[in-house]
Image: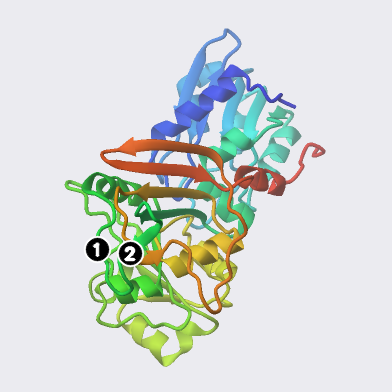
Amino acid sequence: MVGTLLPSLLGDTLGLAHKGDGRTRPNPLVGAVVLDSQGRQFQGYHPRYGSVHAEAVALDLAGPAARGSTLYCSLEPCCHSGQGKHQPPCTGKIIAAGVQKVVVGQLDPNPQVRGKGLDQLRRAGIEVELASDPRPFLRLNPGFNTRHLLDRPYVHLKAALSLDGKISPVPGQGGWISGPDARTEVHDLRSRYDGVGVGVGTVLSDNPQLSVRTDGYKGEQPRAVLFDRHLRTPLDSFLVQQRPGETFIVGGEGANNTPRGRELASRGVEVLPSDGSLAGQLAALAGVSIQTLLVEGGAEILTQFFVSELWDEITLYFAPKILGSGVPLLASGSGNRQPRVLEFEDEEWRILGNQGIFHAYRPGWVDQLARRLPDVHGID
């Protein structure tokens, strides 16, 4: 077992992996280092989706020097092939290269791997070590890990508030709470997520676009995600009219087979049925490969996430305004449960222009992932 204090080369794989930021989705970020018998290092990372894997990059650079070497990997090497997989299994390449030892940061949570890669290496006579603390590596790929271990996307809640805690001036009327610097930052934030989600109330009141509209942005747009159990999204809304092929509406049971669901589908919108619970709606999104989700409101859907504790990260933008009346962050009234006292971990405050920004995580979010990883140390 590798101790909590990471060997320097295993720690180096984290920085290498980040070189693929923004280009590998839905694949995870992965870094690898080959250390040969003469102490030379050969580094690799997964550069983009569909391209060669990190282990293969490092092994190709090492060439004959890989024989008898130690390979450090941030993630368990893959051992499967099949439909949708662009590269051959890394375990085969590692075995063929004559690697003597493999040190791994975390198990691959994908059920097609999940310990099978280490098992295959051990059976080929390769010594394998697994880090005793997988948390730094789980943090590297929160969406990939959350989807496979919790059957839901990694959820980042975001809201803009006045100093008295209002997210909108009055019901039914939008208007910017945050300033231009914060809005620019939010568009950049959207670009890093598979989906941007809102509740149907926000669709009805604000008719949002949920797209990245930064000058010069040429990347892929996140999917628009609407939490709408009863399919109340108007047919003349912006998303149905202008972004139907990029929009998911997550409805209740059998929503896709209702007249309204079929009408939305005929316009190009994908209606996802679920059991109607928030957990069920998130599982439906995981089923269509939404691994990371930025949820921007409104109060009803944010309150549901807080109450259910089905969130992982939060960012709040505080504008220097006091509105007096308006819509509070947490929904109240008949039928709305209130969350228990909300606490956070890894909290930080910063200033952007004239606004204060609070950023934090749900307590224990990474520990929850670590507990879901199987114990494979007995594999022989």
* Local SS, label 1: loop
The residue identified by callout 1 is: 175
Q: Residue at x 62, y 59 (%)?
A: 340
Quarter of the rendering containing residue 125: top right
Q: Position of residue 68 (x, y in %)?
A: 64, 17
Whether residue 287 is visible = no
Residue at the left extreme of this rendering: 215
Seen from the viewer's position, the closer of residues 312 and 58 is: 312
Q: Three-letter amino acid code at disc 2?
A: Ser
Is residue 154 visible in the rendered image? The answer is yes
Colour setting: rainbow
Say if 41 sits above or below 82 in the image.
above
Picture quadrant of residue 359 = top left
Counting from the top left corner in percent of width and height, residue 90 is at 56, 38
* Between discs 2 and 1, the one toward the N terminus: 2
Residue at 58% x, 33% y is 136
Q: Do the numbered discs 2 and 1 sit on residues whose CB atoms are within 8 Å? A: yes
Q: Quadrant of the N terminus?
A: top right
All told, the count of numbered labels is 2
- Numbered circle sitting on residue 45: none
**Residue under pointer 2:** 168
Q: Is residue 45 left or right of residue 239?
A: right
